[in-house]
Amino acid sequence: MSFTRACSTADVATGKAFGTIVDGIPVAVVSTDEGWFAIHDECSHAAVPLSEGDVDDCHLECWMHGSRFDLRTGIPDALPATIPVPVYPISIDGDDVLVDVENPYEISGELSA
């Protein structure tokens, strides 16, 4: 695994998404009561930053059309998006949030319309 610093833990409020670029890849870093997550920061439906959307439990909702993505899998669970987005391994090292964009988790499934 190849972890790169994405941001500081202080940059990410619990229940919010923080958009950043890691090795040229847009990443939304999210802190929830269930843990830390790193998900591709571009909606698969409208190509807008997911980090500008709302976090609800383990879901990130796109602000433009309301697609919701599971932070654990990247699979959308609300239309109009039907294509998953990558989810990346994340690690907390002291005050640093590290993300591995070179090895996204395998995604299996998509929303059935």
Image (cartoon, rainbow, N blue to C red):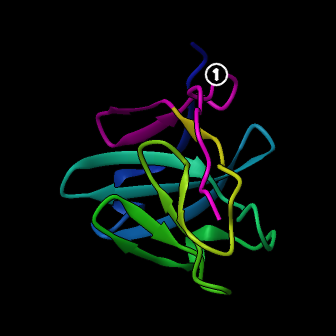
Residue type at mark 1 is Asn
Question: What kind of secondary structure does the magenta stretch mostly adopt?
Answer: loop
- What residue is disc 1 on? 103
Q: Measuring from the top left, give residue 45's x and y in whole percent.
A: 77, 68
- Which residue sits furthest bottom? 64
Residue depicted at 66% across the width and 49% down the height: 85
Left-right relation of 16 to 57: right
| Residue 23 falls in image quadrant | top right
Assign the C terminus to one quadrant of the image.
Answer: bottom right
Residue 97 drawn above or below residue 46: above
Q: Measuring from the top left, give residue 67's x and y in whole percent.
A: 59, 74
| Residue 30 falls in image quadrant | bottom left
Frontmost residue, 41 versus 3? 41
Residue 88 inside the magenta-drawn segment:
no
Dot 1, crowdedness within 10 Å: few (<14), some or many (≥20)? some
Residue depicted at 27% across the width and 65% down the height: 57
Q: Measuring from the top left, give residue 38's x and y in whole percent.
A: 50, 46
Frontmost residue, 79 versus 85? 79
Left-right relation of 77 to 112: left
Residue 26 drawn above or below residue 19: above
Left-right relation of 92 to 42: left
Judged from the image, the secondary structure of the residue bearing numbered disc 1 is loop
Numbered-mark total: 1
Frontmost residue, 69 versus 32? 69
Residue depicted at 55% across the width and 35% down the height: 88
- Which residue sits furthest left? 33
Assign the N terminus to one quadrant of the image.
Answer: top right
Query: What are the residue bounds of the magenta stretch?
Result: 89-113
Residue 98 inside the magenta-drawn segment:
yes
Residue 82 drawn above or below residue 36: below
